Amino acid sequence: MRPLLLAPMLATVLIASPALAATIEVTIDKLVFSPASVQAKIGDTIEWTNQDILAHTATVKGGWDVMIPAKSKGKVTLKAAGTVDYFCRFHPNMKGRVEVTP
Amino acid sequence: MLMRPTATLAALFFVSTSPLALAAEKPTDPQIAHIAYTAGTIDIEAAKLAIKKSKNKEVVDFAKDMERDHEAVNKQALDLVKKLKVTPEDNDTSKALAKAAKEERAKLAKLKGAAFDKAYIDNEVAYHKQVDGALETLLIPSASNAELKSLLETGLKIFQGHEQHAEHVAGMLK
């Protein structure tokens, strides 16, 4: 009888889970965020992969501030809708944008 | 004829802080490598002085960023010249840069507190601007090795970033 019981249980779990959150990859190479502009939904995560020998940040004025060490990664989970421009605090000429929809 | 003291000062300042403008001839790759490395070392020395002397968190943080970035870039530059089997060659531009930097450090060493912070950051803005100009108009166009040219181009983006960062810190000190 066990397999029969499992099916409704599995269905309940699937229905109860929220939509799968995505991870959006952004690469940093030679002081450039690529892609420079990405679209995401609330709950998604942006993950930066830094290929430079320099530490960078992804910083939103009055918002999140993600440290991305040299040859390493950094990430943020998006909690609010809206378009935000971010930059690197160490090299403010590096700019990126995230459009977050509900 | 009377020259206004500020104009005289400005003229002196221009001469003493523009050693890169002295380079008349197109530098060779070994000379370019030496100039770029020297320019980085100068900023590391200035940063070390600021880390030691300043009590302002923004200034000390900025100086630590400069020290970290320029040490990383200079290490990459050394790795590249080793790979290319190029021996950096001292030259008049490097010498003039080093001389001007020594004078600037002596000037900064005499200052304290807010006066030091302002002088250090103002010099960082001016210095990075000067190096940006040299990279754009002289060093990058003169470099013949493609990898050296590419490193200098990345270096230019780093220096431009530092200049904007320095301007931001300067704005906070006002």
Image: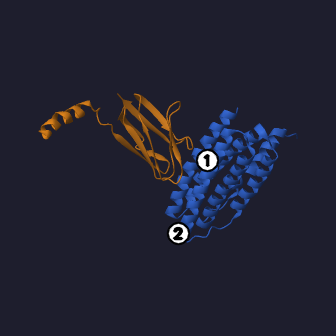
How busy is the neighbourhood of tag 2: few (under 14 within 10 Å), some, or many (20 plus)? few
Across and down, in percent, residue B129 comes to 64, 46
Q: What residue is disc 2 on? A: B83
Residue at 61 percent of width and 41 percent of height: B165
Amino acid tagged 1 = Asp
Distance from disc 1 to disc 2, alpha carbons, whole Å, reads: 27 Å
Q: Is residue A87 left or right of residue B107?
A: left
Residue at 61 percent of width and 54 percent of height: B70
Q: Is residue A52 left or right of residue B44?
A: left
Q: Identify the residue at the far front of this view.
A: A1
How busy is the neighbourhood of tag 1: few (under 14 within 10 Å), some, or many (20 plus)? many
Relative to B63, is B99 above or below?
below
Across and down, in percent, residue B56 comes to 70, 38
As drawn, the chain in blue is: B
Which image quarter is the C terminus of chain B in? top right
As drawn, the chain in orange is: A
Q: Taking the image as drawn, is residue B36 in sight?
A: yes
Classify mark 1: helix, strand or loop: helix
Task: Indicate which label's residue lies in the foreground, 1 or 2.
Answer: 1
Foreground pick, B38 / B53: B53
Which image quarter is the N terminus of chain B in? top right
Classify mark 2: helix, strand or loop: helix
Amino acid tagged 2 = Lys
Across and down, in percent, residue A57 comes to 52, 42
Disc 1: which chain? Answer: B
Q: Identify the residue at the far right of this view.
A: B1
Q: What residue is disc 1 on? A: B65
Across and down, in percent, residue A92 comes to 55, 40
- Can you tell which quarter of the image residue A24 is in? top left
Residue at 20 percent of width and 36 percent of height: A10
Foreground pick, B133 / A65: A65
